[in-house]
Image: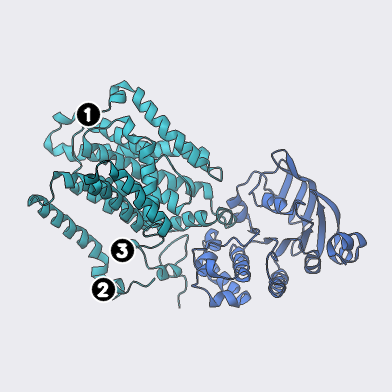
Amino acid sequence: MKTTNAKTMHPLLRKFGPLLGCIVFYVVIMLLRKADIINGYYMQVMLFAGVNVLMTASLNLVNGFTGQFCIGHAGFMSLGAYGAAVITTMVFKSNSIPEAAQIPVFLLGLLCGGIVAAIVGALIGIPSLKLKGDYLAIVTLAFGEIVRALLRLIQPIGGARGMIGIPNYANFFWIMLFVVLTLWLLRNLIYSSYGRAFIAIRDNEIAADAMGINTTKYKIMSFCIAAFIAGVAGGLYAHVLSFIQPDSFGFVKSADYLVYLYAGGSGSLTGSVVGAVLLTILPEVLRFLATWRLVLYAIILIAVMLYRSEGLIGGKEVPFLRIKRSSLYEQPLFGRKKNGLSEE
Amino acid sequence: MPMLEVKDLYVSYGAINAVKGISFEVRKGETVALIGSNGAGKSTTLRTISGLEKAKSGSIIFQGQELAKLKPYQIVELGIAHVPEGRRVFPRMSVKENLLMGANIIKDRAQIKRDLERVHEIFPRLYERMNQQAGTLSGGEQQMLSLGRALMTNGSLLMLDEPSMGLAPILVEEIFNIIRRISEEGTSILLIEQNAFLALTTSSRAYVLETGSIIMQGKSSDLLTDERVKDAYLGA
């Protein structure tokens, strides 16, 4: 439990250490890229790994921390991808955007993608999360397929052929920025009073009800935040690949994220990062095995489930993704946060 | 005027009528027991009062307010603390976090502190294990924690669902001493219990439920000596 190394660190270093680490990591990657040790292909894999971290971490908020079961997460991703791509490619006509306006348009696109996903998340979350039980799983399963089918029918955005010519604005900087930002936000959310409520619902929804927690409200909140992040991740994905089509956001993709989540360890942000990064890279590393690749991939997953059923990092966090729990005991869980509960 | 008044309450799960038109009341400061065998509708009644189940018809009035249309969290805010059946603690939170979860509707920190001290005093055992994970407590300790957590909501009516379930006799005795003490401190209690002897010796009045209806009611001391109760529930 105790984090000896984080404890002995200088307070300033502890506070800004992670930030410093991120900057160093970024610079190192950029230097390696320049020296061409990391080629374009490696870079592409890393960008996808980043997108997958966003998807897995947001799924973790719903499945891992709130104890609900969303199995159509790629549906939100596709909404975000199309939402963002429509803004950058169709509303602003990507090839005629002046250099200076590219980034704001890109960010606007991501924001719109996230908002679209969050609104749809609210629309399907409100009726299904009012109920207790696994209704959300059924509804999100159907939702993922419905979104895919609808996107195939809408001709102005390419229909089944998909959308091409999306500017590839999402470089390593943006992906990394969003990953760091999201993990930081999720960590703070999980350790806030909201996070306590999420975890209470996961651990025992009836007891949470009996404690006066508005379980419906918190479940919907958690679901919408996750949908928003998935939407942003989808927007980034579209701007990495420059091309999206409805069929790349099918059930298989949703299942991939469930695999990343549970292999990494649900209920652990560290687990989401590890699961998503490892399992994004693994199929690429195994590429030399050609068709045997999927067999080995499956065997590795089975081994993880057999020997570490709680996931690779189940239930644990690295120090930077964790807030010292003892400090939590000194604060009221709900209400204002400032002074400690016990003044002595 | 009674504190809690249940009138002609019907609750059903689909086609099965679990509670068929029961009426009872709890007055201020009183301990009332609902006794009866498995499937008599006791838990359903409590769950309906705290909003976890929806009533089919009938009314539940708590301190002049109708509860039937309210959500569980709103009912807790009105002052009904429910200790659900089977020790539902939050296993991965510490004992203290569990207790503070109970205080989540209370915004006054001085009040939370007073309540915590009261819980410490009533349950010295919990105090010793304040930073331990709740899931690692023994069954009796978990029951104490779930009682203590309900006390933290600072409600004026405490509803207990089978506090003796699955506990060793000595712990049952300890839990019931605590319940008596909470009652003496002025909290009204609605108690559900299969152990009719314990329930009747702890409460002042009692209702006997059978397949969803109240078949007998009266002072607990009278019921304790009643032949029919003796035959059916006390097994004398």
Q: Position of residue A279 (x, y in %)?
A: 30, 50
Amino acid type at mark 3: Phe
The residue to which callout 1 is attached is: A164
Q: Neighbour class for label 3 at 10 Å: few (<14), some, many (≥20)?
A: some
Chain letter, colour cyan: A
Amino acid type at mark 1: Ile
Q: Are marks 3 and 2 on the same chain?
A: yes
Name the residue nearer the viewer: A236 or B219.
A236
Left or right: where does residue A196 sit relative to residue A12?
Answer: right
Is tag 2's residue or tag 1's residue first in the polypeptide sequence? 2
Chain identity of mark 1: A
Image quadrant occupied by the C terminus of chain A: bottom left
Amino acid type at mark 2: Met
Is tag 3's residue or tag 1's residue first in the polypeptide sequence? 1
Q: Position of residue B45 (x, y in %)?
A: 72, 51
| Residue under the image location 43 percent in, 67 percent down | A328
Specify the colour of chain B. Answer: blue
Question: Does residue A155 show up?
Answer: yes
SS at mark 1? loop
Numbered disc in front, either 2 or 1: 1
Name the residue at the left extreme: A35
Numbered disc in front, either 3 or 1: 1
The residue to which callout 2 is attached is: A9
Question: Does residue A50 show up?
Answer: no
The residue to which callout 3 is attached is: A320
Q: Neighbour class for label 1 at 10 Å: few (<14), some, many (≥20)?
A: some
Is tag 3's residue or tag 2's residue first in the polypeptide sequence? 2
| Residue under the image location 54 percent in, 58 percent down | B105
